[in-house]
Amino acid sequence: MAWGGGWGGGAMFAGRGTATGLPFGGIPSELADEAQRLLASEPDHPPSAIHFHQRPDEVERRPLTLARMLRAYPRLVVYGSLLVIVTSLLLQAGPLLTEYAINNGMLPGHRSMGVVVACASLYLLLAVLSAYAQRVGATVTGTLASRIMHDLRIRVFTHFQRLSLDFFGDEKAGVLMSRMTSDIENLQQLIQDGISSFALQGLTMVVITVVLFSLDATLAAWTVLGVVPLLVAFSIWFHRASETGYLLSRDRIANVLADLSESLYGIRVVTAHNRQRRNITNHRHVVGAYRDANLYTGRVNAIYGPATIMIGILGQALLLGIGGERVLRHQLSLGALVAFLLYLNRFFQPIQLLVQQYSSLQQGRSSVTRLRQLLATPPSVEEAPDARDLPTVEGRLTFERVSFGYDPSRPVLEDVDLEIAPGESVAFVGPTGAGKSTLAKLANRFYDPTAGRVLIDGVDVRDVTLRSLRSQLGVVPQEPFLFAGTIRHNLKFGRAGITDAEVTEAVDVVGLGELVERLPDGLDTVVHERGQTLSSGERQLLALARAFLARPRVLILDEATSSLDLASETVIERALDRLLEGRSAILIAHRLTTAQRADRIVVIDGGGVKEVGTPAQLRERGGAYAAMYDAWLASGGRDATR
Ligand code: ATP
């Protein structure tokens, strides 16, 4: 990277300097050369062009298989395979050279120092060559694995971005994290070491079998038919037992991770409810179950390792007996017997390695299966293939005989009819769990209704692209989410191309100016832990400012349930007034002061719309809303009509 070019150079240091309040004085000259050298050795990371489409393209739609992943890099695969073949041939030449050196350089009548030295030198040369081939092979498979994993991580992440909200509700975050971590790592392991080592061991066995039979068919038959089946049978037992252990430990580590992530995310609730002891007991339980699974695997390994060594020694004794007898009878040369004994060890090694690595192959394969299933999960809210962009809307929202249930057998909403005019603000009120948020979530297609239609400016929301729909429908959720980064970065989140001047304006409009002034670095203050260091009122104001900057045509505001002090409430109400100017809005109101400010109120209860009207009409009607309102006044609520 060129010195000072882009943010990687001076700008990065300058940024740090500003953040700590110190002026940037440049890199000291004695360090400049060092820094220059360091940066020159840095690989270039040009910004990659990201094309995100709601609908996966032809390539992304194909099921994920190991072969397809490998096929994306044909040159590396061919190069890697050639290296495996060369390595396996080079590695197996040693015993043959030993045989030649004994028979033609050491036995009485054939003594020759020249032959011995030539064989030893060649042996050494081939060993060096095979080490080099293995090194290059490891680099090739390492590169292949890194590239495939990079593609896969992006593919899985892109898929997460496409999936609908119900998926994230059903699946535990820990399980999804383990898809991204352990499953992808298993696969990396498989591609980096597993496949090439499997191929190398398999090929080695073939090469050795051919060589053994060409040396002496009888002794080869004893080896292949007598010793190998014993080892294979034992190895199959091992494989089954270790697979059981692997499946157990995989399931149990998933439980450990899920329990861990839940405890960490919920640490505030845990502390507040004094649940630490019970949490530890629970975690001890899941960790204990994981330990038991590991102990089982350890026991199986402890049996298999020593037993295979025993079989190896038995095999050598057998070969020494039978082979020695054949040497004495002049049916076999001494060199060939030594070569046999050397090959026997080499024969055992691949079998053991193949069996040991079988579980990693198995892990890799089941990881591919799980990732394939994940990638094949379609989003429940899919964009129609012929979806068109929604032109700029006026903001008329229509719910037409809408029914919906998260679980289709348990409807939350039934036959809801409602129309919201352009520019009109409508408050949804009703008991908790009545379906207010749910109805709002159908408008921007977080979910699709099980029956009926939702229309925006007369267009079914299912007929337009999700991007164009959601860019015109702003959502302020009940629990505003703040990302790691500065406040400015969080505010600019809603739309591309927001300028700093717009951010400053938004901060003034929603009344955040005072907060920003109080913060150490103003808008560039870094938000930690999803904004837990800010008050809930401040987080709500930030969410309102974010929505203001996104300039949606229709606003859906899920009001926070937590009550605020009067001063904060006044600031938020003022911010809301500015935000709602000229916009259609759904206000899921938990405070009746908010409901009272809306043009109309919709009472949602028992899965449907119970009452609709202006605040004054509903109060006069003496129905559910009037009762709610009276109860609220009686409990000390401010009369918003005064
Ligand atoms: P509140 O005033 O407490 O926010 P609400 O009227 O907005 O309540 P909703 O959040 O719409 O209620 O929930 C309606 C019903 O649907 C509730 O019974 C709730 O338990 C259920 N529900 C909400 N979200 C989900 C979900 N993701 N999966 C399954 N059920 C859900």
Image: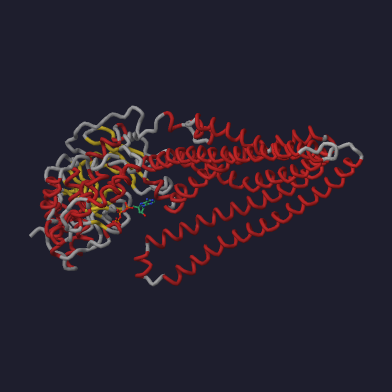
Of the 4 image quadrants, the one containing the N terminus is: top left
| Displayed quadrant of residue 293 | bottom right
From where the camera sits, is residue 388 visible?
Answer: yes
Image position, residue 268 (x, y; %): 34, 66
From where the camera sits, is residue 557 visible?
Answer: no
Image position, residue 482 (x, y; %): 27, 53
Q: Nearer the viewer, residue 449 or 120?
A: 120
Q: What colour scheme governs how the chains and residues are painted in the rendered image of this protein?
A: secondary structure
Q: Residue at x 71, y 44 (%)?
A: 346
Of the 4 image quadrants, the one containing the C terminus is: bottom left
Q: Is residue 421 left or right of residue 333?
A: left
Image position, residue 382 (x, y; %): 37, 36
Q: Considering only vertical position in the picture, is 205 above or below 476?
A: above
Image position, residue 352 (x, y; %): 68, 47
Q: Is residue 53 left or right of residue 77?
A: left
Residue positioned most to the right: 329
Residue positioned most to the left: 642
Q: Residue at x 46, y 49 (%)?
A: 181
Residue positioned most to the front: 113
